Image: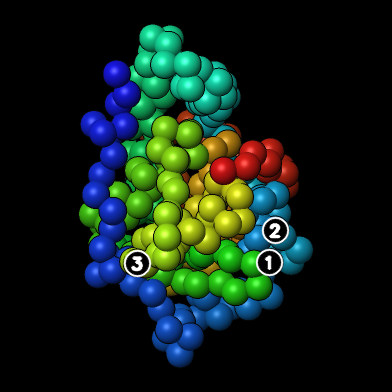
Amino acid sequence: MDMRSEIMTAPLSDGQLVLLANAALPMAVRGHAATDWNALAWTGQCQGLHSWRLARIDDEEIDRLATFYRRLACTGAEQARRHQQRIVQLLRARHQQDLALIRALALPGQVIVVAANGSHNDFYQVADEQALGALIWQHRLYAASLAPQQVTGPASSNYQRLLAAQRSQGHDSLLLLFTARPVVLQLDGSGVRLHGASAGYLAAAVDMLPPGTHWQVQADVKKTCRAA
């Protein structure tokens, strides 16, 4: 039995994920006019930005289980179900850690999602805590290959447009900006990365990491690319 129907949440509405007009872009976005978002999404690095990886003890286990699950899922084997259960257990804990990290960096309404789409980028404001929780959870499932996010036909909502942009570029990164803090948070299948114009910005963000999670800071580690 597949768990997807049990763990998926409802898609975000346009009121929860708000497309920002160019004239309404906050300074946190304008300050990244030179950022190559596609390079950042694919490699975890971008010229002009310092990058630190925030590693967790279960990063390798999740990646290994997700790889096994992708190989077994098409067979319908009971072993795939067991792998799926273990991945979901790990992801639920990771989801709470992700939210605690974001809460340390931003208040509700201060989170901007970057949709890197080739030469054109869109920016979406996450309305509240509930929307943020749903967005991060859906992304964690997607990055672990538990929830293939395919958009069939023209995208009819901001959330579908975000997914379509991600799928078209073939990566598994979710890029978050904060209106009150000069860093970028990158969530992907291999973990968490922080990016900023200076190491000082990153150090200040790391100083705010919530207790209870054993983060290992690794400087300038290139992302292991895995197509979405």
Q: Position of residue 127 (x, y in %)?
A: 28, 66
| Label 2 CA crowd tier, 10 Å (few <14, some 14–19, many 20+) | some
- Residue 183 versus residue 102 in the image, above or below: below
Residue at mark 3 to residue at mark 1: CA–CA distance: 27 Å
Looking at marks 2 and 3 on the same chain, the residue that comes earlier in the sequence is marked by 2
Q: Say which mark, if any, is on residue 156.
A: 3
- Residue drawn at point x = 57 percent, y = 43 percent: 228
Which numbered marker is on residue 39? 2
Mark 3: which secondary structure? loop
Q: Do the residues labelled 2 and 1 touch (CB within 8 Å)?
A: yes
Residues at marks 2 and 1, CA–CA distance in whole angstroms? 5 Å
Q: How many labels does the image show?
A: 3
Residue type of the residue flagged with mark 1: Asp
Residue 162 sits in quarter: bottom left
Label 1's element? loop
Q: Residues within 10 Å of mark 1 (few under 14, many from 20)?
A: some
Name the one closer to the observer, 29 or 17. Answer: 17
Q: In the figure, 117 relative to 141: above or below?
A: below
Name the residue: 50% across, 65% down: 114
Instruction: Report the residue that reaches farthest toward the front.
Output: 153
Instruction: Tell me, yes or no, if residue 82 can be seen here.
Output: yes
Q: Please, what is the three-letter code of the amino acid marked with disc 2?
A: Ala
Which residue is at 66% across, 51% downward?
42
Position of residue 147 measured from the top left corner of the image (x, y, whole percent) = 40, 38
Query: Vertical placement of 13 versus 4: above or below?
Result: below
Cβ atoms at labels 3 and 1 below 8 Å apart: no
